[in-house]
Image: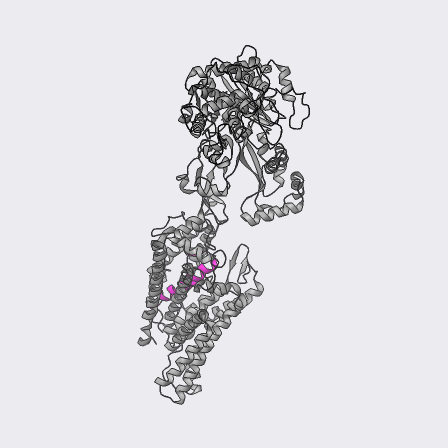
Amino acid sequence: MNNPQLSNRQYYIGGFFVLVALIYIGRLFYIQTIDDTYKEAANQNAFRYLTDYPPRGYVFDRNGKKLVVNEPSYDLMVIPIDVKGCDTMALCNILHIDKGTFRKRIEKAKYVNGRRKSSIFEKALTSETYAKLQEKIFRFNGFYFQKRSVRSYPEKLAPHLLGYVGEVSKEKAKSDPYYNEGDYIGVSGIERSYEELLRGKKGVRIVLVDVHNQEQGKYMEGKYDTAGVVGVGITCTIDAELQKYGEQLMMGKKGSIVAIEPSTGEVLCLVSSPTYDPNLLVGHDRAKTFSKMYLDTLYNPLYNRATQATYPPGSIFKLIDALIGQQDGVLQTSTVYPCAMGYPPMGGKPKCHRHPAGNLIASIQHSCNSYYSYVFRSIVDQKAYPKFKDGYQHWRDAVMTFGVGQKLNSDIPFERSGNVPSVKYYNKVFGENGWRSNTIVSLGIGQAELLISPVQMANVMCIIANKGYYFTPHIVKANTSGTPIDKKFMEKHYTYVTNKIYYENVIDGMQKVVESGTAAASKLKDVVICGKTGTAQNPHGKDHAVFVAFAPRDNPKIAIACIVENAGFGGTWAAPISSLMIEKYLNRKVLRTDMEKRMMEADLITGKSVPAEKPHH
Amino acid sequence: MRKDESKVFYNVDRWMVLIYILLVLMGWLNIYAAVYNEEHSNIFDMSQKYGKQLLWIGGAAFLAILILIIDSGFYTVFAYIFYSFFLLACIAVPFLGREVKGSKSWFRFGDFGIQPAEFMKFATNLALAKFLSNVNLKVENVKTNLSSIIKNYKNTLIAGIIIMAPLIIIKLLQDETGLAIVFIAFIAVLYREGLSVNFLLVGFLAVILMILALMVEDIYLYTIIGAISLLSFVFIKRNRKNLIIVILCTGLAGSMVFGASYVYEKLEKHQKTRIDVLLGRGEVDMKKEGYNVNQAKIAIGSGGFLGKGYLKGTQTKYDFVPEQDTDFIFCTVGEEWGFVGSAFVIILQIALMLRVLNISERQRSPFSRIYGYGVASILFFHLAVNIGMTIGLMPVIGIPLPFFSYGGSSLWSFTILLFIFIKLDANRLLILR
């Protein structure tokens, strides 16, 4: 019955089989060897690049004391699909949340990361909560702890200087390939300026995951993984003891203390008051605390007054005038100018106070306003510059060599430049012909538009202590990786005034200031302090008290600037505080306990417990 | 009977047995790779699917030998009995069996299950072979009167019923599209035994029209069909007979278009989306309806020319591909053995089918020949649909890859199917008819 005609049909059937097989093999050849998209898709499916975050570097003070360390912190994590038979009531009680919140968080976790993936249920548990939870964690199915490393500040000081760490901004994460969203970065202070050293180097692990995103093991036995590199430890120039003492002295006062070692430019302390415990900006209540401090307009604790606040320097600026005047040959030690409770040519303005008339040294000792109005004009109107505007430009250029009116280019972030007004500025304000040296004579006594930050003031003291040069103030001394500090911090910056004799003359006057002048109450036994008081005019309220100094006179160890806001005359608050700081730093011990107590207890912000003020000079 | 004729392997075709063993072992190794995990790395671990598959393979070997021992006459004699028995089992299973994961096609015995629908394949093949070996489908004298047509096509109709009965029962009662649709493969057998090419042409046209109906607006198709009908009058003799034929054809084509759209609308959502995925219609969400095919293609495509190496596939090992041990087992082959491995599997399978066809043609008995064509057709249909769906050329229909996919019922059913043929062939000289 095998019809030969029909038997031909076997070839059609067999041929059809072969045809389909060839089509399939061709298709396989295309998707397996020609089209690469499937290979990429497979890698995206199964590879996860996990980051190993190395611990950040520690920060030490100049004597090796730990200022910033790492501490473990625990987040409570949840995998929603495993939350079955969990003792929800007990968990809610420990976390102080209600069942509705519990359910909402689980729903959110499911929504954001999926049911099988872990999400943060509660961030940065307090140690108390962690202890309670740990006891019962076996009853909370689906929950576990994730350890993180957070910053901790054992000395609880210098928050403005040390700065803090926070989540990287979206913009930064986009522009800088090192960071991913959610990474941490130094936001301010040393944490910011030394971020690249402190952060170390992230490591990457490639793991294989299954369809539920669960880890299944290393890729190629970890052949392509890179290990994280631990952050470099940093030794900063701060003297923790001095910093702490400064913060204590400034309690209840607004203002700042900056102390610098003149021979190196190392910042010994950078006190900004009111201050806060940096540990407050870590952990569970961080966001709450931050916004509270941010909105506190009375105390404004987040504001770093040492670098960001600028003040009219007041009388301390006379020292710079005295130096420039001598250098230009328009001022000698023997020069005497009249004073009639003010500057006579302008009808007694700027005003002055009653003091014995005298030469250059006496003018510093008694801080004569009239004298420095004359000096200022003698510089600006000197014969070498027939046009007074050129004279003013010369004065301004000379002043700026003292590191004022410009950023010092230090490693302290958020430095402000301050201001020394330009010719252009005055042309604009008064018109091209609308001003003379007389118009702006109050610049000579450090008022008018002049603005200087506390760091700049302390730096001026370094210049005088060094008799002609300064090192850029900096806050980092060394790091554990052994790389030397930035060369720019080793470089001497010379000022316009180069002759040491001129400095000696000014220093003579400064020594008198503390021995028998405007800061006579702040003398320190056996140590020659050279200082200068100042009063920074404050259009918004009571003037700010300023005191700058260095000590000892020979081979100076510390240069200091202290500003106490709304405290009036510099001799009353700023000078004693500076003097105590010098004593603390040089002797490591303060014997003048009465003075110490008086300074520490004074609360000038609320006005409580303020001792009766001495009459104005 | 000579002495060695009594031996079990007397005159057994070595090529078919060899390819069979190769495919089964490769399948087992790939099941191991697909469900591999480090905790149970022993390939003989009976708690895992690869351990169980070994049991199934052992059972299959036992069945194969049993089939070779039994006299070939048994299958001819009991062909209708087998057919009726399994048909009844298929009808009974939705009522007596236990529902597993929404499927009503299983009889459960403890940990193991049996799908009668799988065994329906060889039973139908036996019944069809028995029926066709006694009749002729070839229409010799064409007359146009109705009684003559009925007489001429009576046998074709009965053969059609033998094929369609299990298809309809499995689809309607068990709702197992994959198990049901396989019976279409027997059309190839009918074709070999004399089914008019016109039937195939009509069928082919129907498929084209159905696909078009889903791709193009129906109104355009109706317009085109109408235009062709009118044009045909220009080229053919205008008599009554031709008029009737043209009107019939037009009506048929129109109803196919209408039917395709109608059936599509009546389909369940997941079936609609499967068709949409295949035809690339509308928005296909790669995380939902497009997921299976997309992941299957990713797994196979990422294998490259030589593959990632045994047990090194990431896509299949980590469960990105669904049902990778059963219907999507070919993904493991594609990923770990690459183009070389996947092409080898296809060539091996096709080689087996061609060998079956070749041997069918040398049979003296029409029963054996027809049965052989049934074997080749069933195997080919499974191969074409199963691999076709993993590489995106066929809609996703849950049917196993012969000898490869995990599962006792399918392995045993294919083994029985093939070895009955091997036995028939071994005894071909004894059958005189």
Reply yes or no: does residue B427 show up in magenta. Answer: yes
Question: In which image quadrant can residue A325 be found?
Answer: top left
Rendered-image quadrant of the C terminus of chain B? bottom left
Reply yes or no: does residue A616 show up in magenta. Answer: no
Start-end of magenta stretch:
B404-430
Q: In this orientation, which residue lies closer to the viewer: B2 or A467?
A: A467
Which percent across, then down, holds residue A425?
48, 35
Q: In this orientation, which residue lies closer to the viewer: A315 or A114?
A: A315
Which percent across, then down, holds residue B5?
34, 63
Which percent across, then down, holds residue A30?
35, 57
Compared to residue A477, the image places residue B218 above or below, namely below
* Count of numbered tags: 0
Compared to residue B418, the image places residue B246 above or below, namely below
Image-based side of B154 in relation to A545, left or right: left
> Is residue A171 shown to the viewer in this render?
yes
Which percent across, then down, holds residue B398?
47, 61
Image-based side of A293 in relation to A8, left or right: right
Magenta-drawn stretch, dominant element (helix, strand or loop)? helix
Q: In this orientation, which residue lies closer to the viewer: A290 or B280?
A: A290
Q: Residue at x 38, y 48 (%)?
A: B310
Question: In which image quadrant can residue B229 be found?
Answer: bottom left
Rendered-image quadrant of the N terminus of chain B? bottom left
Residue that lies at the very extreme toward the bottom in this rendered image: B239
Q: In this orientation, which residue lies closer to the viewer: B62 or A351?
A: A351
